[in-house]
Amino acid sequence: MSAIDQLPLWDMTPVFPSLNSIEFEESRSALSTEIDQLENLFDSIGVFSDGTGSPDQFDQVIVGLNQVSDHLRTVTAYVRAHTTTDSRNEVASARNSEMDRDLSRMRKLSKRFVGWVSNFDLQELLESSEIAKSHEYSLERAKVAASHLMGSDEESLVSDMEVTGSHAWTKLHGNVTSQLAVKSVSQDSEPMSMSMARALAYSPDRSVRESAYHAELNAWKTVEVALAGAMNSIKGENLTLCTRRGWQDPLDEAIFNCSIDRVTLEAMQTAAREAFPDFRRYLKAKAKAIGVSQLAFYDLFAPLGDDENAWDYESGCQFVIEQFNGYSERMGQFAARAIHENWIDAGPRVGKVDGAYCMGIRKDESRILMNFKPSFGAVSTLAHELGHGYHNVCLAGRTALQRNLPMTLAETASIFCETIIRQAVLKNGTDAQKYTVLEGSLQGSCQVVVDISSRFIFEQSLFFRRRQRELSPREMCDLMLQAQLDTYGDGLNSDALHPYMWAAKPHYYGRSYYNFPYMFGLLFGLGLYDVFVKNPDEFRSMYDDLLSSTGMADAPTLAHRFGLDIRNIDFWRGSLNQIRGEIDQFEALVG
């Protein structure tokens, strides 16, 4: 049995014994009943876009909405835990499909609530209801969101049609990619899952990386028509709904959902573009380090040094716990609990989705999916996802509406936790470890600044062209290649880019413009870490409260608590200067 086969699976039995258990069936049935009762409450009070109510009725509605949302969160997360670790599980797929109706009903109720709230005099409501006051930010955003809703009947129809529309296309992408067999990685190899083939990008053997890259591209080509169909349908639906709801562009809706503004986004992206030449310096230095004239796309994750032997799963877990303890006892205890109570599904396998994520499941409890391969990069991913879990701990006392945080701030704790463990190695590690970790850090930063920028450019170009017509798979590949040329420049070999990155990234098949929040999270997290270094005790006294408030204020307001002005390009330049410093160190080591 290989080391990967021995990696832990997560334990879902504390939630429910199984998908076929009486406990799950009872909870699932109770959830449907609770949604029935909530619908009846909405009907009896008159929660419609043209209705209004008293402060007492408002309190009833928001308490009921929060309670049902909490229950829905647990049931859907439990089902997702099974579908994402084994897409061939027919029972999980059936349960997932059964959830569609309840999810659609809750989307309808949420839209009705938003439209109803817009009819209140907000100031009077805040003065009359303590519950309203504690949800002030959610209500302010509901007022804006209500101005971008169609009529009640139209929104209700959309919620029904999404089940067989964009949501179905999203499922198709997940099922196709998780079950896609990649062949001919080597002459003697058996077909493997896409997640396993993509993991070979971290192999120290360049011939293995190159073979896996070509095999991956060949595999994507076999499903390109289906995936392009899914992409065209999702983006087409999004464009139609944005127009009908009064958004000028899908990006405007994404910016609103991320609790920032155009000024902030443009300041960040301008600073990032200024840094592209510095990232190309890093890529050229890495090419020199591995002995090639120019990196290919399949060299981006090539390890430097003896990384694999130093960072197996057990030692990585212990290292993360130790460093989290060094920051605070609470954070260290959380990491130990997550690891020892088997909240983590660690290894790649057939039927399991690629990548990594953390999902809150109930109260302060989360589950983490990874595709771990021994390396510091994988340990960094572990710290990243545990950061999300720690964020969920800080949010545990908040209601469902108060926990509805934007993607930009969702990355705050994860990036901060990554930075903690990286700085620990750069400060205390051996020279060999520092070299490896420094490159791993730059590898990640390059992905989040340069590659994320390429994905943003691709999606922007895709939306522009999708307004006129559907795009073919070849056209999507061409847009992706151009986006990679515009960002990586001469840092990568233009004949060895990745035209199918649009197929590989599941985020394209969900929320639009998923990409820039990750860059925001990295650079905002670095800015916060700089504040921590300058005044650790004061930072610790404020940080957990910041995390617990991320769904209760916009990003500029929360940043201001730490004296940060994220609308100013100099803030973003300051964070990128930290990365430039690492590039300088790396160039010196390679030289």
Image (cartoon, grey):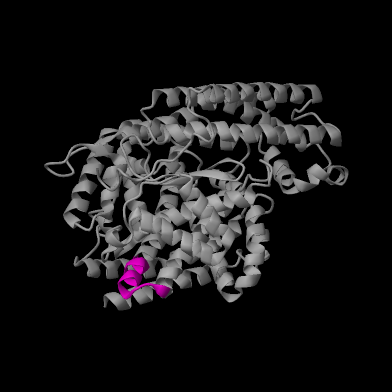
| Left or right: 422 as drawn, with respect to 211 | right
Of the pair 474 and 190, the residue shown nearer to us: 190
Residue occupying the point 51% across, 69% down: 575
Residue occupying the point 76% across, 32% down: 61
Q: Considering the image in quadrants, where does the N terminus appear?
A: top left
Visible in this render: residue 372? yes
- In this view, which residue lies farthest toward the left? 187
Residue 512 vs 457, above or below: the answer is above
Of the pair 169 and 266, the residue shown nearer to us: 169
Of the pair 325 and 552, the residue shown nearer to us: 325
Counting every numbered tag in the picture gives: 0
Residue 110: quadrant of the picture? top right
Q: Which residues are magenta?
A: 428-439
The x, y position of residue 566, in whole percent, is 60, 64
Q: Considering the image in quadrants, where does the C terminus appear?
A: bottom left
Residue occupying the point 54% across, 56% down: 333
Visible in this render: residue 236? no
SS assignment for the magenta stretch, majority:
helix
Q: Is residue 272 magenta?
A: no
Of the pair 208 and 123, the residue shown nearer to us: 208
The x, y position of residue 179, in whole percent, is 32, 32
Residue 400 vs 287, above or below: the answer is above
The x, y position of residue 289, in whole percent, is 24, 69
The x, y position of residue 84, in whole percent, is 42, 35
- In this view, which residue lies farthest toward the front? 340
Residue occupying the point 44% across, 32% down: 82
